Each structure stands twice: as C-alpha cells, then as structure tokens.
Amino acid sequence: MRQPDRNWPKLYMRYVILPRRLLLTAVVLTLAGMPALPQEQPSVSLPPGLILLEEALEGPYVLTGTLSAAPPAQAELEIVFNLDEQTGDHYLLSIKGTTAQFYKVSAGTLQPLGLSGKINWPAQGANFSLRREQWRLSFICDTQMVVRAYDSDLHGPRVGYAARRCQVSDCFIQHLGEMYMSDDFMRPAGEESNWEPISGTWAQQSLRTDPLAEKMRAELSANAFSYLGKSDQGRAMAVSGYWFWEGYICQAAMQAVAGGAMGLVGYYQDPENYLAVRWTSRLSEGADANKLQLIEVHMGREKLLAQAPGGFLPEQWYQVRLGLSAGLACVYIDDQLRLAARTDHFGQGRFGLLAEGKRGGFFDDVLVRPWQVLSEKFVQSVPGKWKVLWGEWSLGEDGTARVRSAAKAAAITGNEDWADYKYGADITAKSGGLGLIFGWTSSDDYYLFRWADPDAPVEYRGQAQIVGVTAGRSKVLDVEPLTRSVSGKERAKVTIQQGLITGWLGDQAQVQVIERGLPGGSIGLYAEHAASASFDNLHAEELLPPPTAHLVKEFTNIEEHREMAEWASRRGLWVTPPDPDKPEAQWQTKGDYFGDKVVELSIPQIGSVTGTMSITVDANPGQEQSGYTLTIAVQKDSNILQVGLLAGEHSLAEATWTADSDTCTVRFSHQGQIVMAVIDDKMIFKERVP
Amino acid sequence: MQKIWRLIRFSGVIVGVALLAVTAAYAANLVFEAEHYTWIKPCMEKVADSKAAEGYCVQIPLRRPHGVEEMAPGDDGNVTFKIYVPEAGCYRLWARVHWYDGCGNSFFVFVDDMDTAHAVQLTDSTYQKWHWVRTRGHEYTLTKGYHLIRFQNREDGAKLDQFLLTTAPERWKPTRAYRETSQYLWHAED
C-alpha cells in the first residue's frame, strides 16, 4: 500500500503554487498577446467567422454587394453593423433559411426590431442593400424589400458579415448624402446631360413648335428649352439620379404634343423593374384613356397599384410630382394629391421621365429633392417603432392607439432630420387635454401643440397652446382661445415651415409662433386626463420649400434680343405695369398663387435713402388697392422703420421697428386665417383675417 | 510543460489574428481640397464659402452683366494640382462644384494633357447647390507617380470645392465632402 506523500513543500508546490502559476501565465498571455476582452463577458457574442470591412461608417449609408445561395434552405447570413468594438453594441440582420429579422444588441442583450420577413434567395448573384438611415433600417434583396425596422440608438463605426452556405461578394459601403437634382434644359442640343435614355428617343429642344412660341407673347410663356421624349412603340424612358436614392420627390413640368401618355418613373432598377406614373389623354379613345395610373413593373410584369379618372389635355402644361418614401408612393398633379399606394418592391432606385406615342411630350423644370413620410395606421405592433414616454397605451381592435391611463400619457416615434414638415392625426376623445408632440430630442427638450375643452381638468382648458420644453423647463410660446368644439373626432395638425409653427384643428389655424432653429427629432401623441382617447391615421410628411419667384428686379440690356427679355432676365416673372418708371408703380407676378403664401426679403443699407416699399399678397390682377399689404417706410440717416399693415385700402395695424444693424430680413405671410409680419424673427403684426 | 506553454502562446496569437481579420473591401480615393492648389492663375481665385468643405473654395468670379452674351472665356484662369498617385489604375474624376446658373455651370478639365483641344467639359444642370459632378464618359489610366490635374475657366460663376480620383466600383458615388488625402498633394516647398 502506497504511503501518502507527506512532503509538504512538494505538495504545496503541486497544488497551490503551480495552479497559481498557471493562472498567472494565462493572465500574462491575455494581456500580452490576445485581444482584450471587455470587462464583463457579453451574453451575445459576435457571429463566428465575421469579416469586418475596412471602411468606417459615418452617418447614413447603404451596405451593398452581391448575394447568392443554392440551395437556400440551409443558407445563413448575419450582417453586423454599427458595431462599437469597445462595448460590443451593434445591430444585427440575421437571415436563417428564408426568414430575416433585425436585432439590436445593447448592453449584452438581444432584442428583436421590427417584424420578420421572408427572403427569396437568388440562385444567381443578385444585388442586396442593407440601408441604415436616421432611424430606418431596411434590407433589400434582388428588387424585393425583405424586412424593415426602426431604431436610432447605435452609431458604432464598423460593419461586417458572416456567411454560411451562401456567397457574398463585391461588398462596399455607399454613404448617403443630400439628394438633389434639377434641370431646366437650358443648353444647346448635343451638350452632355445627366440623362440616360433607356428606351424611345429623347432630344434636347431649344425651341418648341407650339402656337405660343410663334405669337411671341412673352407674358404667357416661360423659356423655350425642354426635353422631348417619344416612342413609336411602347414606352420611352430616360432616367437620372442614383441607384441608392430613397425618400425623394421628383417633379417635372410636362406637355403632351397629342395623345399618348406621359409621366414619371421612380425606384428605377432596370428596364424590367420600376414604378411608373402613367397619365393618358382626356381626348384619346383607347380603353385606358382619361386615366391617371400608378404602375409597378416587376420582373417585366405590370401591376396596377392605383388609378384615378381624369386625363390631360394635349398642348397644356402640367406639373406632375411623384413622392417615394418607405414604400409609399404619392402622385400629385399641380400640387393636388391624386394617387397613393404602397409597394414592397425595390426600396430605392433612380428616377426618370416617361412618354408614349409617336409625337411624345415635352418635359421641363425637373427637380428632385429629399422627401420623407411617416405614416401609421396602428394595424399591428411593430417592435421598436414606438416608445412610450408616460402612461399606458394599447392598440385597439379598430386600428387605433388608445390611452389607458387617466393622467399624462405620451408616446413618440420617428427621428427624422427634417426641418420643415407637417404632421397630423385623427383624435377621438370625449374630454381632456390632447396634443401632438414634435421636435422631441429628449424628455427635457420637445415641443407640444395641445388643447383642451372648457371642462377639462387641466390648466389650459378652453385654450390651444404651443409649448416649448427646454432643459426640462416649460414655456407657453403662444396661446389662443379655442375656436371650435373638440369633443368627438378631430383632425389635428402641426406645420413647421421656415421656423413658423402653426397648430391646426380641422382647417382652422389655432396658434402660431416663430421659433428658429427647431430641431428635427421625434413626433408623438399626447393626452392628459383623457382616458379612452384614441389616435389614428398619423401622417407626417416633409414639406417641400415653397416655390420661389426671382428675388429682385434686375434688368439686363435686352436691346439685341428683345424676344428673350421677358424670360432671360430677372424681370421674367413680373407683369410690367403701365408706367414702370413711376416710383409707386406696383409690379404684380404673372402667375396666380393659391393657398398659403410667404414673402421673404432683405432690406439692405438701412438709413442710406428715404423711401417706402410695399409687399402685397392676395391682390386682384391689375388692382393695386387689393389684397393684404405690408408697407415699410425708411428715412435717410435713421434706423427706424415705420411699418403698416393694410387690407385693401384699410389700415389694420401700425408699428415702429428699430433695426439693430443696417440690414434686416422681412417675412410677410398669409397662412390659414393669420396674416403675419416678422422682422428679424421678431413678430411685428399678427392679425386674424376672414 | 514547456511544450504546453508554447502551445498556449501560439494559440493565443492565432486567435488574436483571426478576430482582427478584416478585408479591404474598398478601393483607394484620392481627395483634394481646391484651395490647396499647387498653382493658381487669375481670374481663378480662392474665396471663403461657409458651405464649402473647410470653409474655402476656388471660383471664376461672376462677371456683370452675367449670361447676356455667349462668348469664349475672358482668360484661361485655372487651378492646377500636382498630385502623387500611389497605385496605378483606372480612375474616375469627380468634382464638388457650385454652379451659378445655366450660364455659369462648367469648367474645362485637363488631366496631364494640357492641350486645349483635349479639354474635357465638366458640367451639369443643378444650380445654386454644392454637389458632385463627374467627367462623364471619361476614365483616366494613371500610372503610379506624379500627375497634373487642372480646372480652367469656361464660364463665370463656377466654383470648385473638392475633387477626387477613385477606383471604387462604378456603382459608388460621392455624396458628401470628404477628408483630404493631403499626403498625395505636391507643393513647391515640399
């Protein structure tokens, strides 16, 4: 029998010192050669075999490349993006078999974002795009929108992927920036342009062959440059822009020569994959005559998404606009919304012009700019899309968001970077305080348009208010008595445009305030002592800058080219008065402006001369004493402005303004029932008019 | 025991390398600020612009009256850059420009060949906005080494903020101002 070892030093070495040495060695190895581990081991680890791209992420972007899998049932792809290697936080797109899902990994926990989607794996290599914008995440594969999610918390700089039983190649990062493109076609024929003709024939036109061009009636004509598209068979298309464009509105002026069709193209991928606005003539005799259509062409197959009656008249100019955002397509004719539809295809793409017919149509004044829409019908709960700030909320069976708590309740969504937008929702409530949140950047910094019926147990009962919360401190920016009853169902809206915030109930402006530097941020719903209030049909839309006329009267020497005078010079948009050299001559615009109007201008060199200027809106053609007029009188060697507001010939208000410098900015507006004059962001007049 | 230590150390190194593996999935971009030119000739001038990258750009100043008469440029004012291309390849040239209007929306561009007959026109129809324009249909095969790039007066009112040469995939487009790769720009005092 073996005797136990009683050599204590030896035992001590074997069972105490040696293990410690092993431990010490392991620690040394870790510190010297192995990658550092975070202090706490995360419970969610990065996918094995992760390949990180070298380029760092910065702002919004698209990760794109080529993807294929055959057979797809076993394929797995994991894309890690916005990875912060210090914390391990990241977003994850996980595709297993045919199911795709976004996740957020934060502080070691994994949470799903958005709803899962189905992917049709391309057997041959097809493009994929993973888009990360302000708060929108989306994955597109082979012209199909696969899955969407919403979150804006993580901004780590790394991206990578791990592919198993599928192939990923040609990956690169396309950073996103401002989308903008314009074309007035003022160039000689043959000069290079941004347009890529896809089908039909397209040609620069420097003269139009129409009756007005021959009559030389400049006051009824704009410049003569345009783009002519026509096709003997099928559709003529010309495209521009970039493959990664999404969230944009494209518009063009167009005039058909005869019948046929004309329109716009959006989300263009290739000749067999795009969206089209197709508008036909009122005078045609075909089965599709007199119609406005929104068509999806996918894999060469056409599908009618939406249609409305009403065609164009040949030889008449129209402005057609197509807005595309998050799969929502909206079609406007002369600023009137005519069609809206959704699509789950494409998710991004170029834009273009469309014409059908042998004689085709002219296109002019093309413009593309960013346009984002946030639309919510509360059909189903989407993880991560809404955040509850206060109170309890639920989704009603009738597709509404319902307040369940008696005290304050608020929920927010979105995180757009837009400056000018409108945002509205249908609100149904018996009583209490209700509101729309906007410009939310934190619980201590946001704006609120709120109102309450006269019996509501809130301090603002019987009033409408715009409230600004800054660093946790609340300030009422504007308050007015309510002009209508608010029980029952009401459409409430906030518009923010060039710093002017207006709160609306129905079509009546309730409150208005100027607030420059308003942040983008989130929007939301608010209720106070309004249990059982419900919200529906939320729609937020970026507002386009209002069309601007030329800013100054500047005349050039037109002796040699009188026929160009009316449009080639700055005077092109103004009707020459009978006696233009008379000091008080009023220059009126050629066009009529409907709806809300804002006129902005600068007065330079205050104190250098004596004189009076006036700005009139809503004037009748040829009648100088009509509309609303803002007059500003200045004196030489004085920085004091005498300001007046008139309705026709009648004075509404007068004021004196002292300029801080030799230049000031004047803003004169008629929006809703409010006429307002602002100088250097200070409100001078605010009058409620019929 | 010694073999065990060696094995552990070796494994640690292997793991470290695997976790740090990256792929260079992006081609080289050479980015240059216009106001950091090598040479400038009037009427081209450097001016401040708050919306240009680093607050400066170069321009052909607006002539009054502007756009009334179509005529050849008044002079051959230009900015020229002597740059070092670190890797031979086929490059596309993009420029971040600001056009005044349809009569102030172009530059002549020269790459190495300064013969005016071979000048390429840089133009498009987006006005009053900083944006990127490419010399369409032109790719430049550049050897490793020094090259000359010139932007020259074609119309008044044209501004240049940055330009870049890239071998990125055709689908890649510049969308914002980029950090300059100043190490590839030659100056006389270098």
Image (cartoon, coloured by chain):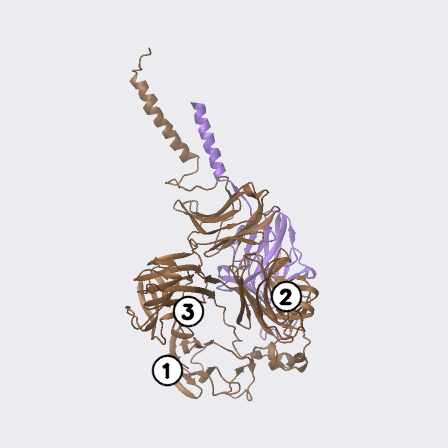
Chain colours: A brown, B purple
Q: Which quadrant of the rendered structure holds the N terminus of chain A?
A: top left
Q: Output the chain of dot 3.
A: A
Query: Which three-letter amino acid code belongs to the residue tagged 1?
Result: Ala
Amino acid tagged 3: Lys
Q: Which mark is residue A493?
A: 3
Do the residues marked 1 and 3 share a common chain? yes
Task: Point out the image quarter for the C terminus of chain A.
Answer: bottom left
Q: Is the residue marked by circle 1 packed among few (<14), some (14-19), or many (20+) residues within 10 Å?
A: few
Q: Secondary structure at mark 2?
A: strand
Circle 2 marks a residue in which chain?
A
Name which quarter of the figure residue A524 lies in: bottom left
Q: Chain of mark 1?
A: A
Q: The disc labelled 2 sits on which kind of residue?
A: Leu
Q: Residues within 10 Å of mark 2 (few under 14, many from 20)?
A: many
Residue under numbered circle 1: A655
Q: Secondary structure at mark 3?
A: strand
Expressed as whole percent of the image width and height from the top left, the position of residue B97 reads 56, 62
Which-is-in-front pick, marks 1 and 3? 3
| Image x and y of residue A195, in percent | 63, 63
Which residue is nearer to you in this view: B112 or A329? A329
In front of the other: A506 or A400: A400
| Residue drawn where x is 31% and y is 60% of the image | A405
In the picture of the structure, the residue carrying the numbered disc 2 is: A354
Furthest-top residue in view? Answer: A1
Q: Is residue B100 visible?
A: no
Q: Could you say whether the residue bearing mark 1 is in a helix, strand or loop?
A: strand
